[in-house]
Amino acid sequence: MRVLFDIALAHLANRKRQSVVSIGGVAMGVGFFIAMAAMMSGFQSYFIAKVIDVSPHVVMKDEFRRAPLQPINRTYPNAAVFLQGLRPLDELRGIREARATIEQIENMGGIAAAPTLRGPIILRYGSKDVSGTMVGIEPARERRVTNIESDMVTGKLEGLLSTANGIVLGAGLASKLGVGMNDTLSAISPAGIVLAMKVVGIFSTGVTTIDNFEAYSLLKKSQILQNRANVVNQLRMRLDDVKLARLTADALEARYGYRTESWEEANSNVLGIFVIQNAIMYSSVGAILVVAGFGIFNILSTVIYEKTRDIAILRSLGFSEGDVRRIFLTQGVIVGLLGTALGWVLGFALTELLASIKFNMEGFVKTEGFVLDRSFRHYWLVAIFALVISGLAAFLPARRAARLRPVDIIRGAA
């Protein structure tokens, strides 16, 4: 094996320029993959962690996934005559028997649930009117399903209990209104009810859609403001095992009939974008490695063409077809290994360069730079891919070299 390895190195050394180009191609593909994977995987993991940390894992809403059938359609589902213009009955929306439902859900084990009344609101401070969402909560239960208390910048969630008509604002919402702690503002609901409310806390979750639009008050105050006494329109739940969110949501929806969404379903549009991002990343970096593979194929094909007489001599000295095949496969593997090693160094350098770039980004979440995932898994994944590409690129030329017959080569030379 030592002799075969030395012959392979000698062939690559005789074509230094082409070998360096091929190694560089593999290194660029490996390096860019590591940097891109660290950037994309880091942001995706950060977003998912933020969503799981800030939002409930499962939400039951006072609506149905499909509109209920009219009585006539339920009675005569295949009737030849049908009525048009029928409207559903005007019913007071809300989750019926919410307290009993919460007890039943928590008795399932591994689930904490909290009642909520969400509704649109207009907050007025001086001449400024800002629209938002009022979330009526019970602080004792809310802290079991979200981490809003740990996200408080100023004030405490308990201030809702100690202050009449207290309100807790998202940092973005407070900034748009220009209010601070202990300021008094007016809350106006679509029902036309106005309440003077005192700011008892400001929170920042890092999720823009929450910080810029949501405000919290006591459940009873929200019910008064929305003119929906004793009504709850959401049950928010947190699971001990977040991986069971989808299965739990499906089971609860089948049991109670209300639309129940897991955090994956609620954020399916963003998670779908992540799938597209990953597809673009793998395809673009894969293309670079495939191009590098063609370079390896070209080098070995040229070497075989130039070294046919050497191959004949090796065969006449007793080297078998397998030995010749291994010589050229070894060349491809050497290029792949050297390119992967250099690519690891390049990828690490690019990752650290991205980490040094600081900027304020506000989209789905707020960050002060690239969120990077420095997982060694990316290094091994791209190494395997690069070595497979290198091996495949070397296989065809190696097989062709192994099939050359010494007699045919000598006759051709003669």
Image (cartoon, rainbow, N blue to C red):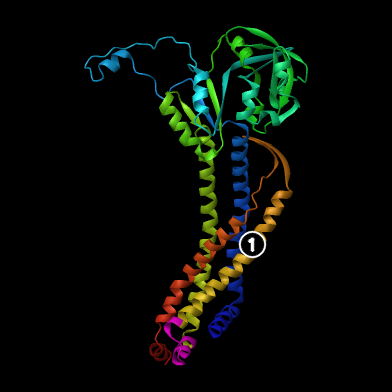
Q: Is residue 191 magenta?
A: no
Q: Is residue 390 above or below residue 272?
A: below
Percent coordinates x, y for residue 91 in the rendering:
45, 10
Residue to which mark 1 is pinned: 344
Percent coordinates x, y for residue 124 in the rendering:
69, 13
Q: Quadrant of residue 126?
A: top right
194 and 49: which is toward the camera: 49
31 to the left or right of 199: left
68 to the left or right of 252: left
Q: Is residue 312 magenta?
A: yes
Q: Is residue 281 above or below residue 70?
A: below
Q: Quadrant of residue 130?
A: top right
405 to the left or right of 303: left
99 and 174: which is toward the camera: 99
Percent coordinates x, y for residue 138 in the rendering:
63, 20
Q: Is residue 326 above or below residue 50?
A: below
| First to last magenta residue range | 310-322
354 and 243: which is toward the camera: 243
